[in-house]
Image (cartoon, rainbow, N blue to C red):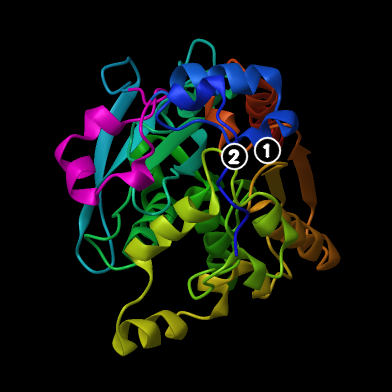
Amino acid sequence: MAPSATSPVTAEDALPAPIHPSFIPKLDKDFIEYYNAHVGNVKSTHEVTIKDIRAFPAKYASVWYKDYSYEPFVKDIKITADDGHVFTARIYNPDPSTSPFGDGPYPIHINFHGGGFTFGGLEGDAELCMTVRTQVGVMLMDVDYRLSPEHDYGKGHDDCWAAVKWVREHGSEINARSDSISIGGISAGGTISAVIQQQARDIGLPLKLAFLGVPLVASHMYIKEPEESPYPSMVENALAPTLSWSRLKYFQSHYTTKSAEEKAALEARGVFFSDPVDGDLEGLCPTFIATAEADPLRDEGEEYGARLAKAGVKTTLRRYTGVPHPFMHMRPIKKAVMYVEDYCSAVKQAHGA
């Protein structure tokens, strides 16, 4: 069973979603202060019905959600997935007066947001997209992919893959270089990136970089208790703030395949789709993997990095201590600032900016 949530009463119990006392010594002070002020003061979304969240999205939006659609050099385009679904991708064009690439065409970094395949949209990673665009001078594309449970698991991934292929074939239409593409994402977006880097390799589509932030790269769909996982961090961090075992299972309850037909369709995609860590890793693009010390997903992300390196892939693996999943959104805490600096540096190096 997961560690007991029973604990002595603390001064922070007044918060709707307090940090479990056992985690206080494990976390950086600035994270705790940020969490108590901006995250723990709102009821966790895994304790709310999907119906309520969809009905009142602003009420449950994370504090870091931003809308930059009105900013100069930002525009939305429409892309059609292979099954005919039309989705939005937001383009963050660099300022030609400050970009090292001048008037372009620009290298492009494609972002896939997080949210457990259930939450998120174009606002979740907007701050990161704006920062990378401004500091590196490349173009950013952020993909508004389909979510569960309204859509079958895998449909959102198909949208992201369609976006990558669209840039390869139509990049000139948005002044992007189709020969200089990188991808990345946080949490579910990191999972999508891990799958797409394998798909891209298989069709000969070169990628400059895959940046995986706190990714889920092994399937936990049919694990009932954290002790059943081969990764110790699942038990160690089962009561972690922001992503606990119960929250992880909440997400998976919305996208776990329900019927034999759905399971067969998922299996037909290949093992790399549900378990990227078990895929064929040879010949993949350079990869940066970021893990968080107090994250249940820590160990599988680090195993993926180790397997990539063993397969000869240029790999950077960095564990950010004293923080949980997904700390990188929580600027100005120090580890979030470090993450963004690492992100910008990796994208800059990948594209020769």
Rendered image quadrant of residue 202? bottom right
Task: Please give left or right for residue 193 compared with residue 234 in the image.
Answer: left
136 shown above or below 169: above
Q: Tell me the SS state at disc 1.
A: helix
Rendered image quadrant of residue 101? top right
Task: Please give left or right for residue 109 compared with residue 323 in the image.
Answer: left
Please provide the residue range marked out in magenta. 42-66
Q: Which residue is mark 2?
A: 7
Q: Which residue is mark 1?
A: 22
| Residue 230 lies within the magenta run | no
146 shown above or below 227: above
75 shown above or below 238: above
Locate residue 274, reporting x and y percent: 51, 71
Residue 285 visible in image = no
- Tags 1 and 2 in contact by the CB under 8 Å rule? yes
- Front residue of 155/188: it is 188
| Residue 45 lies within the magenta run | yes
Would you call the spot at circle 1 few (<14 residues within 10 Å), some (14-19), or many (20 or more)? Answer: few
Q: Residue at x 33, y 15 (%)?
A: 72
Q: Residue furthest left?
A: 55
Q: Tell me the SS state at disc 2.
A: loop
Q: Nearer the viewer, mark 1 or mark 2?
A: 2
Disc 1/disc 2 C-alpha distance (Å): 8 Å
Q: Residue furthest front?
A: 8
Q: Residue at x 54, y 48 (%)?
A: 244
Tell me the amino acid under the disc marked 1.
Ser
Q: Residue at x 55, y 29 (%)?
A: 9
- Front residue of 203/322: it is 322
Q: Residue at x 52, y 28 (%)?
A: 329
Would you call the spot at circle 2 few (<14 residues within 10 Å), some (14-19), or many (20 or more)? Answer: few
Locate residue 264, reporting x and y percent: 38, 88
